[in-house]
Amino acid sequence: MDMEFKNIIELYHHLLPALKCRERELKEKGCREVSVEFIWDTLKREKWSRSHHLTLGEMVNDILKFDPKEENMKKDLYSKEEVSI
């Protein structure tokens, strides 16, 4: 069964539990400035904008595997200690 969303805000609200979970995990591992919005915006810009026909499951998987160290970040999101994710 394919889910269709009326707009990006509706999609965001469906993905919010996964976004909050990943934010919490990253903060527990020392990523001090990560936020739900940062994860959402980065994945929208860096990954999902180049993809077609994504399923909700694929998007949730991307969120739960999100690693800011692998993304092209301009600011340091980690504390000075080396953190392993």
Image (spheres, rainbow, N blue to C red):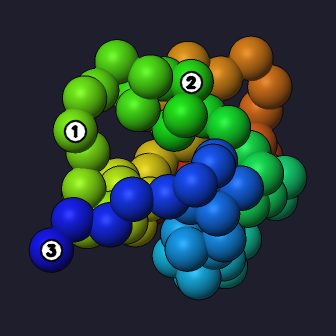
Circle nearer the viewer, 3 or 1? 3
Q: Residues within 10 Å of mark 1 (few under 14, many from 20)?
A: few
Q: Quadrant of residue 47?
A: top left
> Is 49 placed left or right of 42 in the picture?
left
Quarter occupied by the C terminus: bottom left
Above or below residue 69? Residue 28 is below
Q: Which of marks 2 and 1 is nearer the N terminus?
A: 2
Give the CA distance from mark 3 to mark 1. Answer: 13 Å
> Is 11 placed left or right of 51 in the picture?
right
Quarter occupied by the N terminus: bottom left
Q: Residue at x 39, y 59 (%)?
A: 4
Give the CA distance from mark 3 to mark 2. Answer: 27 Å
Q: Residues within 10 Å of mark 3 (few under 14, many from 20)?
A: few
Q: Label 1 amino acid? A: His
Q: In which quarter of the image is residue 17?
A: bottom right
Residue 82 visible in the displayed image: yes
In x, y percent, where is residue 26? 61, 67
Q: Label 3 amino acid? A: Met
> Is 68 placed left or right of 70 in the picture?
right
Give the CA distance from mark 2 to mark 1. Answer: 16 Å
In x, y percent, where is residue 39? 63, 49
Badge 3 element: loop
Q: Which of marks 3 and 1 is nearer the N terminus?
A: 3
Q: Mark 1 points at which residue?
A: 53
Q: Name the residue under label 2.
A: 45
Q: Residue at x 58, y 55 (%)?
A: 6
